[in-house]
């Protein structure tokens, strides 16, 4: 008697992710598996060591950095470094600035965020300009993305810049590869990122107050509840604002492509390329 295997109905997002995974080459699939294994090990590590001990270690480390004469410059150098592809961790370092220096950490976080992104823009535009011009001239999708930004102008540049998608490092690479975006426009648009940086620094400062066991022991339940609520509130605000910005970016790109009658499917493909920072991360 034949055995019938029940069909599995996947959520559209899960189905799309599975299709994208199947399209990857061996190295791409290996990278995905490595990331999954890394996060599983990370969760296991947190459970075994316990969050309170990890938080105390991070607090002690922050105190040591704060005692260094040039501790803030170390954090600023790290922020500039992770502004270059393929590094990641911009939001984590924003939290660390608040964790280490409280709300005063906003100053080094803001300066290094603006300076680091501008440095990436100038260096990539200077050293990769010829390669990028050749790439965009032969890649129809990337040319469509340039047309979108040219048509919508500076407001769309700001929307894409303050969005969490594409991630920070890929956003820097994206605008460096688009000839129609000037350094002045890029830096001015980056200024609109500072409110988000402020939220990250604030969340980090609140986490620090709950990480030290001695400080926690002197807090009453109300103070702990307020600090915890502020942390959750800051994270929720950041997520909601990022989603709203991403929604408007998506809408603007679709509107622009529908009004310009470009090749079918270029809008979605150009948007995907914007999220991936394609030309600076692929080998010729």
Image (cartoon, rainbow, N blue to C red):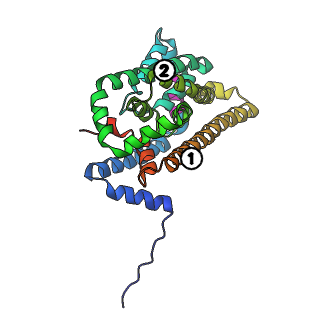
The magenta stretch spans residue 168: no
Q: Secondary structure at mark 2?
A: helix
Q: Quadrant of residue 116?
A: top left
Q: Is residue 203 left or right of residue 143?
A: right
The magenta stretch spans residue 55: yes
Q: Residues within 10 Å of mark 1 (few under 14, many from 20)?
A: few
Where is residue 139 drawn, in percent x and y?
32, 43
Q: Residue furthest right?
A: 222
| Residue 65 or residue 152, whichever sits in front | 152
Q: Is residue 226 visible?
A: yes
Q: Earlier in the sequence, mark 1 or mark 2?
A: 2
Residues rendered magenta in the picture: 54-60
Q: Residue furthest top?
A: 69
Give the labeled residue for mark 2: 184
Classify 77 as above or below 202. above
| Residue 173 or residue 266, whichever sits in front | 266
| Residue 80 or residue 281, whichever sits in front | 281
Q: What residue do we see at 68% from left, 32% from top?
A: 227
Quadrant of the rendering where the N terminus is positioned: bottom left
Q: Residue furthest left?
A: 284
Classify 104 as above or below 23. above
Where is residue 186 drawn, in percent x and y?
48, 25
Predominant SS of the magenta segment: helix
The disc label shown at residue 251, or none? 1
Q: Is residue 210 left or right of residue 136?
A: right
Quadrant of the rendering where the C terminus is positioned: top left
| Residue 184 or residue 261, whichever sits in front | 261
Where is residue 222 drawn, in percent x and y?
76, 33
Count of marks overlaid on the render: 2
């Amino acid at each position: 008697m034949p055995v019938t295997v029940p069909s599995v109905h996947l959520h559209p997002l899960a189905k799309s992710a599975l299709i994208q995974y199947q399209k990857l080459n061996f190295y791409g699939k290996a990278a995905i598996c490595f990331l999954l294994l890394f996060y599983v090990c990370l969760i296991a590590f947190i459970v075994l060591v316990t969050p309170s001990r990890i938080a105390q270690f991070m607090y002690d480390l922050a105190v040591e950095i704060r005692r260094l004469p040039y501790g803030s410059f170390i954090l600023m150098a790290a922020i500039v470094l992770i502004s270059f592809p393929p590094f990641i961790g911009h939001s984590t370092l924003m939290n660390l600035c608040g964790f280490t220096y409280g709300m005063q950490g906003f100053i080094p976080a803001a300066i290094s965020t603006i300076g680091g992104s501008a440095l990436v823009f100038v260096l990539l535009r200077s050293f990769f300009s010829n390669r990028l011009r050749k790439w965009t001239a032969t890649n129809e999708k990337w040319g469509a993305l340039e047309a979108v930004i040219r048509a919508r102008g500076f407001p769309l540049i700001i929307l894409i810049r303050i969005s969490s998608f594409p991630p920070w490092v890929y956003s820097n690479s994206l605008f460096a590869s688009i000839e129609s975006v000037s350094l002045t426009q890029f830096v001015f648009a980056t200024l609109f990122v500072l409110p988000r940086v402020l939220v990250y620094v604030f969340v980090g400062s609140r986490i620090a107050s709950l990480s030290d066991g001695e400080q926690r022991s002197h807090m009453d339940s109300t103070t702990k509840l307020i600090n915890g609520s502020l942390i959750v509130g800051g994270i929720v605000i950041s997520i909601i604002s990022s989603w709203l910005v991403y929604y408007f970016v998506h809408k603007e790109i679709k509107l622009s492509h529908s009004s310009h009658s470009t090749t079918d499917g270029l809008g979605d493909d150009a948007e995907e390329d914007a999220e991936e920072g394609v030309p600076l991360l692929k080998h010729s």
